[in-house]
Amino acid sequence: MEHFPSTQFQISNHQSPITKKALVTDDCHPVLLEGLEKMGYRCDFEPNISPAETLKRIGDYEGLVINSKILVNRAFLDAAKKLEFVARLGSGMEIVDREYAEKLGVKVISSPEGNRNAVAEQAMGMLLALSNNLLRADREVRQKIWRREANRGWELREKTVGIIGFGHTGSSFAKKLAGFEVEVLAFDKYKPVRPSHPGGTGFAKDFSHVRETEMGEIFEKSDIISLHLPLTDETKFLVNQNFVKKCKRGVIIINTSRGKCVNTLDLVEALENGQVGGACLDVFENEKPETFTPAEHEIFDRLYKMENVVLSPHVAGWTFESKYLLGKILVEKLLAKTSAMA
């Protein structure tokens, strides 16, 4: 397996003097640490540091690299007296108060380009595993149980796939669907619907197999709905009882975006009554089982017993390739911002 050694990426042959410090609060590829050091930062690599300890120490740093556990809110930024940049590995910028950071002159960057392909491949793989009953079939064959008819699958061909959110990951997922002979409908609230044929002006103009539409048609026609959204006040619990009631009966829900875009109880009940025919979930409303309330234990236990769901532990965007690209792209963006300000 190629792990993309950092020697593949060269910023320059010049090593800037170490004059500043950057705190790296999560795991990353060495390409990011080497890049920051060449830019003149001493990197304190502490992937196990707690949010409380980060807040306590952030006043000593000019740079901060985060993944998902650190909330960079107003109070955090007020404590970060020297901070020049916040670099987010991946996407999910709801954890950073970007408006206040801009007011303080703190640069904020992310690298969604680094793992968009990984997320799209995971979504595609989960969907194929679900449609072909692969997880159950695999378990049974290992136990010498041979049930061909019970594990008969269904094909994607001639199905309609609705993509909600057509940014980095939504458009990447659309690319993966190109060869499956499906109809792809795309909706993005912040991108007006326009003719999207090649050469047109729509947000899906580069995808001849994708048609831009509104949510009404997504509900009416989609056999499969895939979420590719940030977590905002608007998207929190977007998939709820009201949402699934508008969908075709038996719709498949894919969520590789943010767990709280889906109301877990409403989804479980819809799976139980057949309104939702299956689900592929890489993200969850609560991703720390050790903190489950009794009510959450009961809800998730119901979900875990279902055979028409495919589940994974928020790993869609975390491949060997994406780990390298996430760091590489952050360094490139920091260099570009630094050059622009020079």
Image: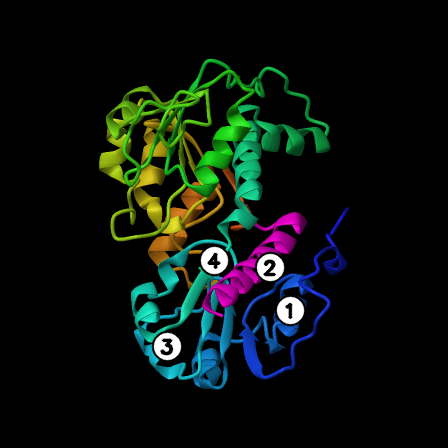
* Residue found at the far left of this picture: 242
Which label was assigned to residue 76?
A: 3
Number of the front mark, 3 or 2: 2
Q: CA distance from mark 3 to mark 2?
A: 23 Å
Pinpoint residue 2: horizontal percent, then vertical percent.
Answer: 76, 48
Magenta stretch in the rendered image: 317-342
**Residue assigned mark 2:** 327
Kind of residue indicated by mark 3: Phe
**Residue assigned mark 1:** 33
Q: CA distance from mark 2 to mark 1?
A: 8 Å
Pinpoint residue 213: horizontal percent, then vertical percent.
Answer: 30, 25
Kind of residue indicated by mark 4: Ser
- The reply to whether the magenta stretch includes residue 86 is no
Number of the front mark, 3 or 1: 1
Number of other residues with Cα within 10 Å of mark 2, as a class: few under 14, some 14 to 19, many 20 or more: many
Q: Earlier in the sequence, mark 2 or mark 1?
A: 1
Pinpoint residue 320: horizontal percent, then vertical percent.
Answer: 67, 50
Kind of residue indicated by mark 1: Leu
Q: Earlier in the sequence, mark 1 or mark 4?
A: 1
Q: Is residue 27 above or below residue 296?
A: below
Which label was assigned to residue 241?
A: none
Whether residue 250 is visible here, answered yes or no, is: no
Numbered disc 1: secondary structure: helix
Residue nearest the viewer, comparing 216 with 281: 216
**Residue assigned mark 4:** 110
| Residue at image location 40% in from the left, 49% down from the top | 259
- Colour scheme in use: rainbow
Pinpoint residue 190: horizontal percent, then vertical percent.
Answer: 29, 41
Q: Earlier in the sequence, mark 3 or mark 2?
A: 3
By secondary structure, the bulk of the magenta-drawn segment is best described as helix
| Residue at image location 54% in from the left, 71% down from the top | 25
